[in-house]
Image: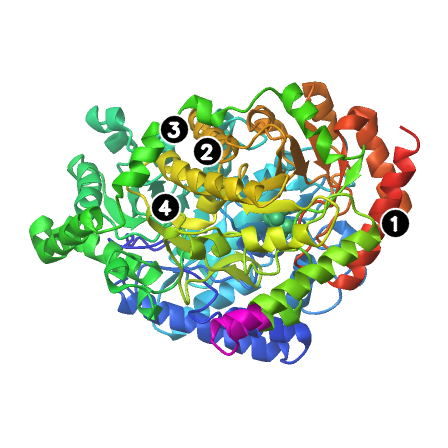
Amino acid sequence: MSASQLPHATILGYPRIGRRRELKRAVEAYWKGSISETELETAAKDLRAATRARLVELGLSASSGAVPESFSFYDQVLDATLALGAIPSRFGQVEGSDLTKYFALARGNADHQPLEMTKWFDTNYHYSVPEIDERTPFVANPTALVSLVAEAREQGIETRPVLVGPVTYLLHAKPSDDAAEDFAPIDRLDDVVAAYAELLSALTAAGAGWVQLDEPALVSDSLSVPRKQTIELVERAYAKLGGSSDRPQILLTTPYGDSSQSLARLGALPVEAVHADLVRGSLPETAIADGSLAQAFADTQLLAGVVDGRNIWRTDLRAALAQAESLQNAGIATVIGTSNNLQHVPHDVNDESKLDARLKSWLAFADQKVEQVATLARGLEGGAAAIESELAEVDRVLADRQSAPGVRVGAIRGRVAAASDADRTRVSEGERRDAQRGLNIPQLATTTIGSFPQTAEIRKARSAFGKGEIDEVAYEGFLREEIERVIRLQEEIGLDVLVHGEAERNDMVQYFAELLDGFAVTENGWVQSYGSRATRPSILWGDVSRPAPMTVRWSSYAQSITDRPVKGMLTGPVTILAWSFVRDDQPLGDTASQVALALRDEIDDLVEAGIGIVQVDEPALRELLPLDADRQSAYLDWSVAAFRLATGGAAPEVQIHTHLCYSEFGQIIDAVDGLDADVTSIEAARSRMDVVVPLGEHGYSRGIGPGVYDIHSPRVPSVEEQTELIRIAADNIKGELLWVNPDCGLKTRGYKETVASLTNLVQAAKAVRASV
Ligand code: MET
Ligand SMILES: [Zn+2]
């Protein structure tokens, strides 16, 4: 084991998709068969080389493991699955190269469903869920990791491979279908740790001086074991791993939340460096004051994650430096870093040519964050004086952000301040049910979640309009034809409550961001969402207001050409915040209230235009739930309040729907009830209606549409299959509350399977209707 310390500046990871999404292009070309595996490997190698060179250019040291090796073809959890050789037995023998196996797990193949994907901590990033049982083999396969070390060395860089740590890995796995009822993946900890030990030994042999093991499980109260047990598992795992003499130095990280409670215990582990997220988390003040933290860290470096890796704002360098100095002054060997892997932010602000220059000066994407880390490291070494000009520059920027027009708008703030509980409260559920009888909605009413397939034609028209190739009249005409087609199709299929299809929306958040004041959109600000998919989150920088109606012309046109009710379709305040980069200068709840008021006005206008049903989607409600149990109730308070402020002005006869698409529902069921929506559609088909049991037990008394059609694949669910799911729902929930719908929107589906599946859905609803 070499004994060099970690240099004063590092980051936990860097975006791997490429400045112009080069990885997406290469990987998708490989999937299509238009480039070979060797060509894909070459493209990836070039990308990694460019990343390393860039990080050194931005100020990270080329030696002693300051540059993290955080590349992934698809997902970092999947990387660990392959490195551990933990291929689920249901895949049998996958023939071919390691990469063939890798993508077979990620995407499935002719014979096998892919690994499930689900959200990573409280981010909008999805990881591939490992499937583990009593017999899962753990056979270290270090080939990929080892080759990265050699590749970096050729470039003159001593790199630091990054791996999801053993405890976090297992706590994010699910039991495979073969596992016994009472089996939990974490039961295999010792076996997994043995495989990690082999990986570490191979890295040492390859010449790696450092390795990074990510253990964010330490900051979460949302996992299957309580947090006080997680730290014990980590202690057990790292006593083993750290105890081996045949390993690189270990950096253990705890991004995404607060590890202050366990920090001293982590410092005492046999590892050489421990990271703390000091943006989401805090410093253990008492342990600093009484010297116990310094004692625990006597032989361990502390990586202070003071630069926010979840947001795109320039760091308040003075405050960040003060945090790091308080550690250094306490006698702790301190390194400056980011709060988390920068995979959650775009590459470079300088790639934005159209953003307003003033707004741009407030921003920091990944490259700027690396520079800030390097600057702070100089400050920590030489004192504030060493970086005085940088500090002064940030002071100026922050002051400018405070006072710029649009950041604080008196009229908007006044309206939020004046909003009362009465504005968030509709008449009782019962009164509303009576008032809504006029909508003439049958039992087991059928509907969809909003979007219809986004065809190539739609995307082409939108892009032509964006580029000015067709004018507004032509674009509007195109969309009206599209709406008319979708309405006629739904009538033919026989759905009860129709939608306009959302053809005008590029994305359910960006569409609104582009029409609201207070937002900006980027050109190249891509962030990986899963696999080769990336999104471009909007920037919510100022006070939010609605200069003009946003959806009324589409919804009212749809309603004007049919006798059946058409649902208006809006995205809720929490989801708009969750999928944007949100200002960090005021509580999220304040920002949410502003968005809510804009939506409230939109609902008024929709109703005025003759729309009797409005759906406000909140698919991100669960995702934003804080990892820290202590912070959850405050979050649920403001998020529910925002939804109610958005919808609370609707008259009793207006039916408010919401849509949530995930199935881990139990934790927030009271909050969902608190939304006070008349009807809620949720994801349920994939889990075969698991969710209806807790709903039934809860005595949920509102309309509910558990999805009966899994829209995540082109597979067409048969009438029988959907009938059975509806029956399961009807066994647990009263028929008059039950709606029949797919799990989520249809925008990623093709028309062929959509029509077949919805036709079956309507048949299934009819079959059950006849018998309840
Ligand atoms: C991710 S939730 C999507 C809801 C939206 N109304 C749609 O149908 O696409
Ligand atoms: Zn959805």
Dot 4, how many residues are within 10 Å of its Cα: few (below 14), some (14-19), or many (20+)? many
Give the left or right position of residue 671, taking residue 642 as reference.
right
Dot 3, how many residues are within 10 Å of its Cα: few (below 14), some (14-19), or many (20+)? few
Q: Residue furthest left?
A: 385
Q: Where does the magenta region start and end?
A: 461-475
Is disc 4 placed on a helix, strand or loop?
A: strand
Res. 373 visible in picture:
yes
Q: How many marks?
A: 4
Disc 1 residue type (three-letter)? Ser
Give residue 544's mark. 4
Residue at coordinates 34% horizontally, 28% vertically from top-left? 418
Report, in whole angstroms, how far the alpha carbon at label 4 lies from the one at label 2.
Answer: 14 Å
Report, in whole angstroms, how far the alpha carbon at label 1 lies from the one at label 4.
Answer: 45 Å
Which label's residue is closer to the chain start, 2 or 1? 2
Q: Is label 1 or label 3 in front?
A: 3
Residue at numbered disc 3: 419
Q: Residue 611 placed where, x, y %?
A: 62, 43
The answer to whether mark 1 and mark 4 are in CB contact below 8 A is no
Disc 3 residue type (three-letter)? Ala
Which label's residue is closer to the chain start, 4 or 3? 3
Quadrant housing the C terminus: top right
Residue at numbered disc 2: 642
As for residue 594 lying within the magenta part, the answer is no
Residue at numbered disc 1: 718
Report, in whole angstroms, how far the alpha carbon at label 3 lies from the one at label 2.
Answer: 11 Å
Depth order, front residue of 270/291:
291
